[in-house]
Image (cartoon, rainbow, N blue to C red):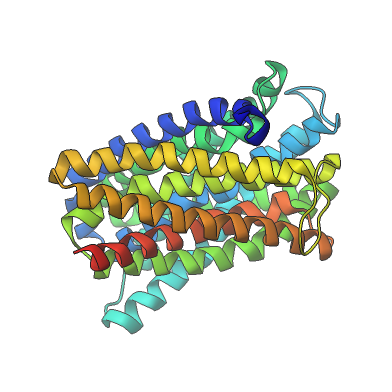
Amino acid sequence: MIRHLVDMKMIRESFVALLLALIADSFAGILLNHSISVFNAVPGLLMILPALLDMRGNVYGAQISRLSSKLHLGEISGMKDKKVKINIISSVALAFTVSYIMIGLTAGVFYFSRDVVVPVFIILTIVLTNHFFTSSILTPVAAYISVKSYEKNWNPDNIGVPLISAIGDFMVVFFMVFSAMLVLWLPHYLRFGLLGIWVAYTIYVFTKTLRNKEGKKIYKESFVVLILVGLFELVTGTLWEDNKIALILLLLPPFQETLGNIGSVLSARLSSHIYLGYIEPGFIPRGKQFMRDVASTFVLTFIMSSIVAGLGFVYTHSFVVVGMVFAAGVLAATLLILISYYLTYLSIKLKMDPDNTVIPIITTLADIVGSGTVIMFYYLFF
């Protein structure tokens, strides 16, 4: 009976990827904790880290979703397809160009909220160095995950974003720490030389993207969305900054990343199923597949919340923490299901590709919703 209510293939495939992402987030948190002195040396660098972690899902997760839709529609033949290559270069261009504005926004928030002037050029050099390493690895890996999983009869919508999260979260933190240490070690004049190289590289990938019709469409639809969600991600950074409670900081990274991954899986599936005609979009969606996707999302949320709750119980030996995590998980999942569907519906109504717009928004809102619900229920339960 349960097989008719939920999509067991989605749950089975997504769980493995979500579990890997959760484990990777734990290692990323350990590395971050041991490298806090690096972030203390550069005011403002830690504030932008949530936005960079979120960009991993916003840019590379959206890349996987686009490729998945094209694979389902039979528009891509393999890894050497031109559409795969333009998706890769477009993702690199987005990662680099968005960073300039995000660093400016971070500097502004830091100045007006804390009256502190951050070293913008140093942060910019660190972030662009980080992007060079991460994008050089993550963009081809994202394409490989999409194409090869599809060829192996796995659904890229189910595993793509969680897998790229598992790889990307640790890599972003690792290369951020490495890049910061490298840039701080370099003499002053070499820092500007390195920054000049990254500026030239940004111009190269930007112009190459805009010369291609599909690349231009991807960039045009994604850029503004990435700026907006990056600005919202600063809200997450502020929530972290203002609630430095050991239990909250322990639970937030795995909780909100898991929510973001589940929300991204749902968004990618909704997009593909609407294109394939399995879901009829409207103010009230129609189609059995929609209810199966919703039910499956709640099952995944329950399973992953159990793991995060277990982590909290091991840390506190308190069943109150377990109840807090489950309450936050149910509320957050409900909100994300509603947000995912209506964002997809709105994108289609506006004649925009939901693969370019919905996943960046949903991963960012998952961070805010996840942080907000955990903090809210912490104060309600304790």
| 183 sits to left or right of 208 | left
Please report the residue visible at 23 percent of the width from the left and 63 percent of the height from the top. 381
Left/right of residue 167 with respect to residue 160 in the rendered view: left
Number of numbered markers: 0
On the image, the x and y values in percent for residue 86 come to 74, 39
214 and 243: which is toward the camera = 243
The reply to whether residue 60 is in sight is no
The residue lying toward the viewer, choosing from 331 and 256, is 331
Q: Quadrant of residue 68?
A: top right
Q: Which quadrant holds the C terminus?
A: bottom left
Identify whether 130 is placed above or below 6.
Answer: below
Quarter of the image with the N terminus is top right
- Taking 123 as reference, is 301 left or right? right
Residue ID at (72%, 56%): 344
Q: What percent of the width, then of the height, locates residue 192?
A: 40, 57
The image quadrant that residue 67 belongs to is top right
Q: Is residue 76 visible?
A: yes
x%, y% of residue 178? 31, 41
| Apparent side of residue 185 relative to residue 20 in the rendered image (left or right) | left
In the rendered image, the vertical position of residue 342 relative to residue 254, given as above or below: below
The furthest residue to the top: 152
x and y percentages locating residue 320 in the rendered image? 21, 52
Identified at 67% across, 15% down, the residue is 152
Q: Residue furthest left?
A: 317
Q: Residue furthest front?
A: 1
Residue 152 vs 336, above or below: the answer is above
- Foreground pick, 329 / 187: 329
